[in-house]
Image (cartoon, rainbow, N blue to C red):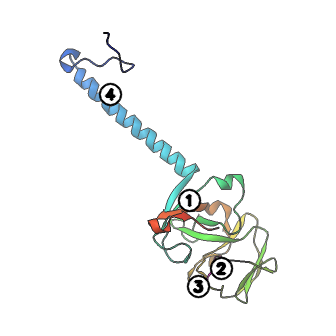
Amino acid sequence: MSDVQTSLSPEPAPESQQGPGGARKAIGHFIWDIASSTIIAILLSLLIITFVGETARVQGISMQPNIYSNERVVVEKISYREHPPRRGDVVVLQSPIDPNVRLIKRIIGLPGEEIAIHDSTVFINGKPLSEPYLTHATTGYLAPQRIPALRYFIMGDNRNMSMDSRTFGPVARDAIIGRAWLAYWPPKSFGLVSH
């Protein structure tokens, strides 16, 4: 019967046979393995967060009843490299008022369109916008205005409790971080975000 090697490298000799400094070398290799693995994990995480997606916790009631405060969502960043944001997309964006704050809102108006609000309805280019995700009418008045190039008119689904483009105007495309794709916490809210 012959011995079979189970690894590609021979097993290290016991410490008693390694000679002077062998234990220090083993500890050094162990520390290097941990450090290099940690650095690789951090770099991969940064790449994923920057280019693929990230998670966000919703704070506030401006998107109720579709998304509730303290729900967690996955924000994907890939689709807007393929196409511009679309009407109805729920997006996470940097607040135009405070760059340290992120908002979650729905895209209502697109660049170049005319938007107006009256008679409890949003109008795009003079036509009423169908908004099946709303449970309450849109109150207030917004005189017709043209949305500038590379800007989007965003609103919360809970229109009476939302600070949005009606307050601070259309937002720049660069402020949009990504599309809210999946609600995952709490478990009862698990599912795709409706667009």
| Viewer-nearest residue: 162 or 72 | 72
Identified at 55% across, 54% down, the residue is 53
- CB under 8 Å between callouts 4 and 1? no
Q: Classify mark 2: helix, strand or loop.
A: helix
Q: Nearer the viewer, mark 2 or mark 1?
A: 1
Q: Which residue is mark 2?
A: 166
Extreme residue toward the top, this view: 1
Q: Which residue is mark 4?
A: 29
| Position in image of residue 48 (x %, y %) | 53, 48
The answer to which quarter of the image holds residue 121 is: bottom right
First in sequence, mark 2 or 4: give its number. Answer: 4
Q: Which residue is mark 1?
A: 75
- State left or right for residue 188 relative to residue 158: left
Q: Is residue 134 magenta?
A: yes
Q: CA distance from mark 4 to mark 1?
A: 38 Å
The answer to which quarter of the image holds residue 27 is: top left
| Position in image of residue 10 (x %, y %) | 33, 17
Q: Disc 2 residue type?
A: Arg
First in sequence, mark 4 or 3: give its number. Answer: 4
Identified at 73% across, 90% down, the residue is 119
Residue 160: mark: 3
Which residues are drawn in magenta? 131-135
| Viewer-nearest residue: 154 or 121 | 121
Q: Classify mark 1: helix, strand or loop.
A: strand
Q: Nearer the viewer, mark 2 or mark 4?
A: 4
Q: Classify mark 4: helix, strand or loop.
A: helix
